[in-house]
Image (cartoon, rainbow, N blue to C red):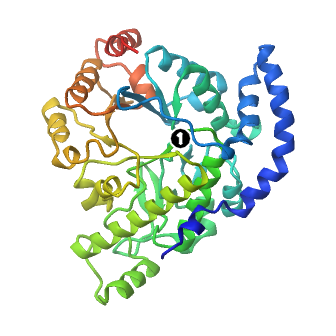
């Protein structure tokens, strides 16, 4: 489907209406919040961030702290195996600790299991629920994204919201239930696959209503929150075994003239789906940049060409075409030789200087911590190869999950030595 730049850039009518309705209220809230901060009121920072949101769409996005001469030092903030989302205090403690390490970016999850961790009019319209009820968010009347924005401002951190689940949703989610025609299926006709024990479905990015939903969701987000960028990762994709829903197959056959059912690894079929995904990412990029000048689109894919063959993500072309501004390649390798081999990738070498090109480093997972010596060695190697910086997965494994012979304090000390200079 082709969409004009003007249509892609247009702010959805419901968003315009929302701004008009809440503008006066937030102006008053801003006055109250400023006074609250001056008086040390515990709700002052969040209230101020919320009040500031009404002005966000009127100015360009803030510049990134990571530049050509300042390395990116970030960490993904996951809600899995973590208590960070349970309270403002937990979020504040993490931000303070990361800032104390001379790091400069947090990538907090904001889209997970078909739900947002912030109130969204778009989600209320399409799914019937404005925000996830997990972690007591609805009962507490919280807006975690406003809290992250305020904490970033307080501690000198870029807040880059991470839309972690990408094009995946649980099979029993409200989005899947309300829009079954959006779901893709695999070559055997199945609409679900197992995602860490959760029956999960893909939303078909070829479907025009799926594209419209994501465009509205992203435009709403970047015009509501004062952030420098948003990020998609390897889940903003499609397994190569999927794409066999009736709508997608019909589009493929009409555009290519092929009438036979392609095999998952068929070269033309992979190329066509990758092209459609590229067009969709380009649509999102144009829409958010038109709605919010200078906003960046970051992506965090798997190494190429594995990402292309298995998940139809031709992300090097996204860089070449100027669609994305930052790429954080997930180089999750246990051994230094394998890690070095990925850093020497010809695909990466030819993209240097065309976007901020950083490396995702695995700091461990709950059942498998990574020694801090390995984390530091891989970070040093990233520097030696001249990449723009690192983002660690994830906050708990970086700071708390200890390998044999380590303590949380010894991990922190190792990180302090690595990032001793601001």
Instruction: Indicate the quadrant containing the C terminus: top left, top right, bottom left or bottom right.
Output: top left
Between 288 and 171, the one lying in front of the other is 288
At which x and y percent is residue 2?
48, 75
Q: Let me know if residue 133 appears in the view.
A: no
Relative placement, left or right, of 20 versus 168 is right
The structure residue drawn at horizontal position 28% and vertical position 70%, both measured from the top left corner, is 271
At which x and y percent is residue 137?
69, 38
| Total numbered badges shown on the rendered structure | 1
The structure residue drawn at horizontal position 45% and vertical position 27%, both measured from the top left corner, is 395
At which x and y percent is residue 226?
62, 38
State the residue position of label 1: 161
Between 190 and 51, the one lying in front of the other is 51
- For disc 1, the neighbor class at 10 Å (few under 14, some 14 to 19, many from 20) is many
For residue 361, above or below residue 377: below
Relative placement, left or right, of 25 versus 200 is right
Q: Quadrant of residue 393?
A: top left
Between 90 and 146, the one lying in front of the other is 146
Question: SS for tag 1?
Answer: loop
Q: Quadrant of residue 383?
A: top left
Between 273 and 68, the one lying in front of the other is 68
The structure residue drawn at horizontal position 28% and vertical position 75%, both measured from the top left corner, is 269
At which x and y percent is residue 297?
46, 48
């Amino acid at each position: 489907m082709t969409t004009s730049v003007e249509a892609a850039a247009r702010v959805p009518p419901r968003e315009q209406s929302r701004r008009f309705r809440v503008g006066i209220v937030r102006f008053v809230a801003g006055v109250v919040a400023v006074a609250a901060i001056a008086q040390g009121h515990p709700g002052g920072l969040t209230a101020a961030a919320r009040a500031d949101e009404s002005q966000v769409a009127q100015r360009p996005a803030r510049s990134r702290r990571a530049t050509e001469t300042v390395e990116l030092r970030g960490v993904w903030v996951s809600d899995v195996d973590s208590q960070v989302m349970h309270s403002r205090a937990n979020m504040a403690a993490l931000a303070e600790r990361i800032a104390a390490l001379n790091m400069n970016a947090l990538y907090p999850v904001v889209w997970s299991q078909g739900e947002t961790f912030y109130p969204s009019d778009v989600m209320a319209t399409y799914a019937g629920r404005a925000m996830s009820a997990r972690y007591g968010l609805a009962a507490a009347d919280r807006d975690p994204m406003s809290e992250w924005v305020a904490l970033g401002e307080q501690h000198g951190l870029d807040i880059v919201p991470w839309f972690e689940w990408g094009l995946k949703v649980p099979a029993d989610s409200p989005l899947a239930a309300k829009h079954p025609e959006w779901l893709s299926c695999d070559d055997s006709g199945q609409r679900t696959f197992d995602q860490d024990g959760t029956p999960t479905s893909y939303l078909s990015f070829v479907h025009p209503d799926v594209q419209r939903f994501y465009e509205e969701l992203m435009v709403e987000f970047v015009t509501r929150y004062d952030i420098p960028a948003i990020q998609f990762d390897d889940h903003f994709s499609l397994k190569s075994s999927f794409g066999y829903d009736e709508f997608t197959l019909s589009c493929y056959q009409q555009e290519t003239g092929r009438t036979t059912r392609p095999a998952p690894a068929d070269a033309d079929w992979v190329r066509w789906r990758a092209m459609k995904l590229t067009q969709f990412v380009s649509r999102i990029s144009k829409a958010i940049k038109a709605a919010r000048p200078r906003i960046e689109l970051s992506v965090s894919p798997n190494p190429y060409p594995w990402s292309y063959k298995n998940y139809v993500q031709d992300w090097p072309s996204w860089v070449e075409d100027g669609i994305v501004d930052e790429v954080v390649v997930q180089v999750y390798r246990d051994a230094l030789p394998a890690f070095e081999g990925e850093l020497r990738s010809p695909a990466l070498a030819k993209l240097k200087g065309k976007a901020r090109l950083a490396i995702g480093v695995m700091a461990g997972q709950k059942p498998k911590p990574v020694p801090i010596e390995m984390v530091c060695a891989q970070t040093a190697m990233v520097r030696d190869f001249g990449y723009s910086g690192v983002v660690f997965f994830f906050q708990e494994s970086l700071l708390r999950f200890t390998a044999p012979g380590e303590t949380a304090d010894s991990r922190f000390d190792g990180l302090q030595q690595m990032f001793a200079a601001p």
